Image (cartoon, rainbow, N blue to C red):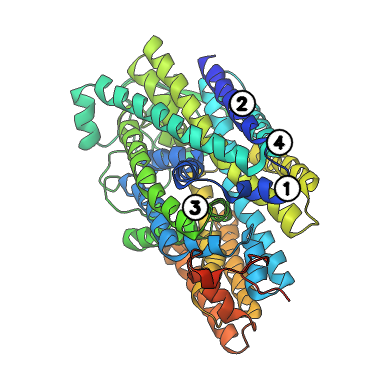
Amino acid sequence: MVGLLAAAGIMAATLLVGLRGVAAVRTTSDFLVASRRTSPLVNSSAVAGEYLSAGSFVGAAGLMVKDGVGSLWYLVGFAAGYVTMLVLVAAPMRRSGALTVPDFAEARLGSAGLRRLSAVVVLVISTLYLVPQFRAAGLVLSVVSPVPYWVGIVLAAGAVSITLALGGMRAATYVQAFQFVLKMVLFAIPAIWLVVAVGAAVRTQALHPVEFDRFPRETTLVFRDRVTVETAAPVRVDGELLAPGTHSFHGGQRVIFPAGTPTPRVGALEPPGGTAWQRPLFDIGHHGYPLFSTLAVLFATALGTMGLPHMIMRFHTSPDGRAARRTAALTIPLIGLFYLFPAIYGALGGVLVPQLYLSGDTDTVVVALPSQVDSGWQGTLFTGLLTAGCFAAIMTSSLGLLLAGASAISHDLGAGGLGRLRLSVLGSAAAVLLLSLPAARLDAGILVTWAFTVAASTFSPLLVLSIWWSRLTAFGALAGILVGLLVSSTAIGVTVGVPNLSGWAAVLANQPAPLSVPAAFLTMTVVSLRGRPTPWALSAMLRLHVDENDRSSRTSGRSRTVRRRR
């Protein structure tokens, strides 16, 4: 009940804070970019709040319990991505005067077809990123309260869509800036309490893990999905002795393991605390290529950040390019500070709730920890605080993602207008809600990484070459985006449809960025060299790189987009 009240409180706060932006929404620019008047300090807090999603926070801690210490490289990539964005994209994108990434693509290269394709890519990325946010809402609420999985999804989708439909980007900015501070408090205080309350022995074990090879006490597990385990010795489960070999547990099955029972194995997963689990590299799928896997993850997350459409839109809310760069610079330390906490929860989870790797519920590790330390009022209180923090993370990220998707439908693919934008928000939320219902068995971290991979394979090369290379052509950009989208999407499909791959093929199927990103860059470059750039390419490049305060870069009474209007 406390968890349900905490979630309800966060959703009520989201609606109340978001209502501040309703009165200021009169035009499409107000709705999409908050009239371009957001200060760097407020904007950096909003950017950090939007970027620090439930999928990345909860998913990172869960991946650490399931896959080991090497999973923390995801957090390094997420934070490093903002450095590349600061250096290559932030200020030029704001100077472009565009409202969205497809808007920028058409203005820079003069192609309506490129705008439509870019809008489709925005929808793909937004959906891949939104599903784990709503999924996290369902999982967290089902763990801390007796409500079913779908209730959390419906509540989150409702609160986010109503707030955004009423107040647009201005409402999102207020909510995200407020909830960034709130998230810091709600995740930091329980983390400090956990570190102090667990005692010296658990802290030592968290720093020097011991392999989870036996259940230290009687443990009840509820399997979320069908799981096949392998036992090397007889295991007594629910009074029945299981012989050594392979056994399956179905979704929803409740199993009690007596104290001292040897832990079964789940495929190639290394039990928490094992030798491979402690390795400071991430081995995708445990196929034996940890260094390559780690580099692939860094490649996808660092470059993918630069291509996330909802983050690019956020820089358009700055008054000018200099403010956009300051926003990005201020955001980096905020993100770095916040990402200390998933490591704490993951390390403690590997000691206190290592059994979650068997049931497939590792994404619930954050809210599962307080009750393991204290079964009384303190455990209940901190479970409520963490539930509120998770829902705050869900709200902040979902607002930006939903706005990016709705703008692609209404502003970039349709006729636009405030009424259509608001309807698109509601329709997009309903569609993602339906997609989130069957996604309970998928890892949040994996879904988020897929979104980053598609962004790195499509918008990353488009933005870098559009901003820094005057020879890029519309046809080259179209071809490169199609190649990047096709390669990354095919790999994702192979991962879902062919789960028995092994070796290098399995690693590249799970994380195709080392293949798809160079392919997209190379395609854009080669195809563009065989064509002619737009007549306004050099003037557009000048506008992107010259500070707005320079009188020569100003165009009185004319459009402020990168394309020279005729």
Left or right of 212 in this view: 161? right
Left or right of 311 in this view: 154? right
Whole-angstrom CA distance, mark 2 to mark 1, is 22 Å
Whole-angstrom CA distance, mark 2 to mark 4, is 11 Å
Residue under label 4: 166
Q: Position of residue 398 (x, y in %)?
A: 59, 41
Q: Is residue 17 above or below residue 74?
A: above
Disc 1 residue crowd, few under 14, some 14–19, many 20+, Cα 10 Å: few
- Tell me which residue sits at (46%, 54%) in the image: 323
- Front tag of 1 and 3: 1
Describe the element under mark 2 as helix, strand or loop: helix
- Front tag of 3 and 2: 2
Mark 1 / mark 3, whichever is N-terminal: 1
Left or right of 165 in this view: 341? left
Which residue type carries mark 1? Thr
Does the image show residue 258? no
Q: Is residue 368 above or below residue 510?
A: above
Which residue type carries mark 2? Leu
- Front tag of 4 and 1: 1
Residue under label 2: 16
Q: Is residue 370 above or below residue 350?
A: above
Describe the element under mark 4 as helix, strand or loop: helix
Residue under label 3: 449
Whole-angstrom CA distance, mark 1 to mark 3, is 34 Å
Does the image show residue 103? yes
Whole-angstrom CA distance, mark 3 to mark 2, is 32 Å
Disc 4 residue crowd, few under 14, some 14–19, many 20+, Cα 10 Å: many
User: In front: 63, or 159?
Assistant: 159
Residue under label 1: 27
